[in-house]
C-alpha cells in the first residue's frame, strides 16, 4: 500500500479525514460552550452565595470552590461518567428497567465542565463584584430599585464588564478541559484524532493536526475576548 | 456510604501517592530550569532568542496537556525506526518518561511567564543601587535580582505547582497507575463512583493543602522585611549617673 502524504491524510479527499476532524472540532466547541454556560449559571449562584449568603451558605460555597479547584478535573469527569450512569440505573430500576443506562457523553461532559468551571467563574464574578462601586448600589437602592431590578440593571452589566478578562482565562481552561471529555467516548477533536491515528497508524500526523486546530480555536477566542473587552470598556475613562 | 469500603479504597489509593508526587516534582523541578531559560530568552532583547521562546509559550499554553501527552507517547511512535537508530526509543517507550517530558514542557511554558513577571517586577532602583556598589553580571543577578524576583513570583508559582499535582492525573490515561489511575480502576471494578471519588478527592486535597502550607512557609521565610519586628525590650539605662 502506498503511503499517503500528510495533506491527503488530513485533507478532504476520499482518503482524507478532513471533514471528520472539522466536525469533531465543532463538537469540541459545542461541548465547551455548553459547559461554559452551565458554569456561568453555577458560578453566578455560588458567587451570590459567597457575597450575600449567611454563614452556612457562605461556607458551603467556599467549600465548593476550594474542593473543585483542588482536585483533578479528570476525577470529576469520572464521577459524572460512572456515577451518572449508576444514578440513572438506580432510578431506572425503580421503574422496572433493568441493566445499564448510559448517560449521553455530551451531557456528562458539559455537566462536568460546568461544575468545574463554575468554581473558577464564581471567583471571577466575586472579584468583579468587589469592583462595582458601593455608591452606585446605594444610588440604585435610593431610587427604589428592588433586588432583581438592581441586579439586572446595575450589577450584572458592570460585573460582566469587569469579569471579561477573567472569563477569558476560564474559557481557555474549559477549552482544554474539553479534551479530557474524550475519556467518556464523546467524539470530539482528541477522540477523533485517536480514532484516525489508530486506523491509519499515523498518530503523530493526527495529534499534530489536533494540536494545530486547538491552537487555532484558542487563538481566535483570545481575539474575540479582546474585542469584547475593548467593546465593553468603550465608555470608561482610561488612566493613561 | 460504606465506610469499610472507603477505608480499603483509601489504603489502595494511598499506594499511588508516591508516583503522583514523583511525577509532579520531576516536572516542576525540570520545568523550573527550562522556564528560567525561556524567561531569560524572552527578556534578552535579542529577537532570535525572544521569538522562539514566545512561540513555545504560545503553543504549549494554547493546546491541551492531554494532546501534548498523546503527541509524545503515541505520536512519536510513528518515528520508531529513527528513534531506535538514535538510541532514544528506550526513553520514549516508557510511559513514565513520556509523562514527565510532557508535564515538564507544559509547566515550563506557564512558569516562564510567572518568572518573567517576577523578574520584571524587580524595582530598577534596586538594580541601580547594586550597580553603584560595584555589582554586575551574575553577582548582581544572584544577590539582588533573583531573590526579589523569587519573592514576587512565589504565590503564582505555588498555584502552578498545585496545577501540576492535578495535571499528573492525566498520566493515568497513558497507563500510569498513580492516584487517579488506581481510582479509575477501582471504579470500573466496583462501580462505586461516589465513594472512590470522595476518597481520591480527599487525597488530592490533603496533598494540595500540605503543598500550599509549605509554599506559605517559604514565603514567610523569604519576606522577613514584611514581618513585624520582634518586640525589643526597652532598655532603661540610666546614663550619666
Image (cartoon, helix red, strand yellow):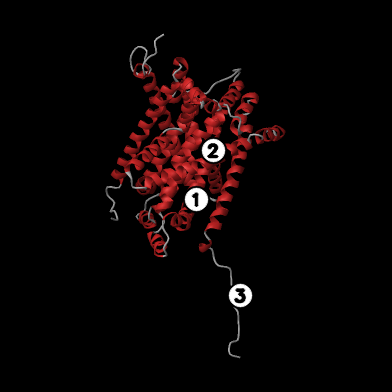
* Gap in angstroms between the C-alphas marked 3 and 1: 34 Å
Q: Report crowding for label 2: few under 14, some 14 to 19, many 20 or more residues within 10 A (C-alpha).
A: many
> Which quadrant of the view contains residue B144?
bottom left
Q: CA distance from mark 1 to mark 2?
A: 17 Å
- Give whichever of discs 1 and 2 has the lower sequence position: 1
Q: Relative to residue A16, is residue B143 drawn left or right?
A: right
Question: Is residue A198 visible to the viewer in this orientation of the structure?
Answer: yes
Using the image, determine if residue B143 lies above or below residue B195: below
The residue pinned by badge 2 equals B166
Residue A203 screen position, x and y as percent: 45, 21
In this view, B16 is above or below A11: below
The quadrant in which the N terminus of chain B is found is top right
Residues at marks 1 and 2, common chain?
yes
The residue that disc 3 covers is: B233
Instruction: From the top left corner, tell me how far across and down residue B115 is, in percent.
Output: 44, 48
Circle 1 is placed at which residue position?
Answer: B155
Tell which circle, 3 or 2, labels the residue nearer the N-terminal end: 2
Q: Chain of mark 3?
A: B
* Residue drawn where x is 37% and y is 40% of the image: B54
Mark 2: secondary structure? helix
Q: For residue A118, which numbered disc appears in the image?
A: none
Q: Chain of mark 2?
A: B
- Residue found 60% across the figure and 28% down from its top: B184
Amino acid at each position: 500500500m502506498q503511503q499517503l502524504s500528510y495533506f491527503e491524510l488530513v485533507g478532504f479527499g476520499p482518503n482524507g479525514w478532513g471533514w471528520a476532524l472539522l466536525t469533531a472540532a465543532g463538537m469540541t466547541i459545542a461541548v465547551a460552550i455548553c459547559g461554559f454556560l452551565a458554569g456561568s449559571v453555577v458560578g453566578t449562584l455560588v458567587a451570590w452565595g459567597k457575597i450575600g449568603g449567611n454563614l452556612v451558605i457562605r461556607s458551603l460555597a467556599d467549600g465548593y470552590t476550594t474542593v473543585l479547584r483542588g482536585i483533578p478535573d479528570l476525577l470529576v469527569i469520572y464521577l459524572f461518567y460512572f456515577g451518572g450512569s449508576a444514578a440513572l440505573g438506580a432510578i431506572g430500576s425503580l421503574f422496572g428497567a433493568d441493566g445499564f443506562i448510559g448517560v449521553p457523553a455530551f451531557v456528562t461532559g458539559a455537566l462536568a465542565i460546568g461544575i468545574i468551571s463554575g468554581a473558577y467563574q464564581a471567583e471571577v464574578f466575586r472579584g468583579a463584584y468587589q469592583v462595582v462601586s458601593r455608591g452606585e448600589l446605594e444610588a440604585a437602592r435610593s431610587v427604589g430599585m428592588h433586588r432583581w431590578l438592581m441586579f439586572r440593571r446595575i450589577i450584572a452589566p458592570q460585573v460582566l464588564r469587569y469579569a471579561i478578562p477573567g472569563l477569558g482565562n476560564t474559557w481557555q481552561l474549559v477549552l482544554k478541559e474539553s479534551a479530557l471529555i474524550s475519556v467518556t467516548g464523546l467524539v470530539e477533536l482528541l477522540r477523533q484524532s485517536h480514532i484516525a491515528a489508530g486506523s491509519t497508524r499515523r498518530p503523530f500526523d493526527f495529534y499534530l493536526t489536533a494540536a494545530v486546530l486547538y491552537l487555532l480555536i484558542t487563538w481566535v477566542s483570545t481575539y474575540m475576548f479582546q474585542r469584547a473587552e475593548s467593546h465593553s470598556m468603550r465608555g470608561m475613562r482610561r488612566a493613561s | 456510604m460504606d465506610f469499610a469500603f472507603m477505608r480499603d479504597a483509601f489504603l489502595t489509593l494511598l499506594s499511588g501517592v508516591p508516583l503522583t508526587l514523583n511525577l509532579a516534582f520531576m516536572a516542576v523541578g525540570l520545568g523550573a530550569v527550562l522556564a528560567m531559560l525561556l524567561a531569560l530568552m524572552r527578556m534578552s532583547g535579542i529577537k532570535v532568542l525572544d521569538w522562539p521562546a514566545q512561540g513555545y509559550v504560545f503553543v504549549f499554553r494554547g493546546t491541551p496537556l492531554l494532546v501534548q501527552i498523546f503527541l509524545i507517547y503515541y505520536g512519536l511512535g510513528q518515528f520508531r525506526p529513527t528513534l531506535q537508530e538514535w538510541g532514544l526509543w528506550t526513553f520514549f517507550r516508557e510511559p513514565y518518561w513520556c509523562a514527565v517530558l510532557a508535564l515538564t514542557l507544559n509547566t515550563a511554558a506557564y512558569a516562564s511567564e510567572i518568572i518573567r513577571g517576577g523578574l520584571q517586577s524587580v524595582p530598577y532602583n534596586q538594580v541601580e543601587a547594586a550597580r553603584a556598589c560595584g555589582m554586575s553580571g551574575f553577582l548582581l543577578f544572584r544577590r539582588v535580582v533573583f531573590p526579589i524576583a523569587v519573592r514576587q513570583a512565589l504565590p503564582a508559582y505555588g498555584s502552578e505547582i498545585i496545577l501540576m499535582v492535578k495535571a499528573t492525573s492525566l498520566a493515568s490515561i497513558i497507563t500510569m497507575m498513580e492516584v487517579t489511575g488506581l481510582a479509575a480502576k477501582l471504579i470500573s471494578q466496583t462501580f462505586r463512583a461516589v465513594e472512590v471519588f470522595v476518597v481520591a478527592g480527599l487525597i488530592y486535597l490533603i496533598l494540595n493543602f500540605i503543598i500550599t502550607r509549605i509554599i506559605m512557609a517559604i514565603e514567610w521565610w523569604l519576606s522577613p522585611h514584611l514581618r513585624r519586628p520582634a518586640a525589643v525590650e526597652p532598655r532603661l539605662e540610666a546614663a550619666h549617673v
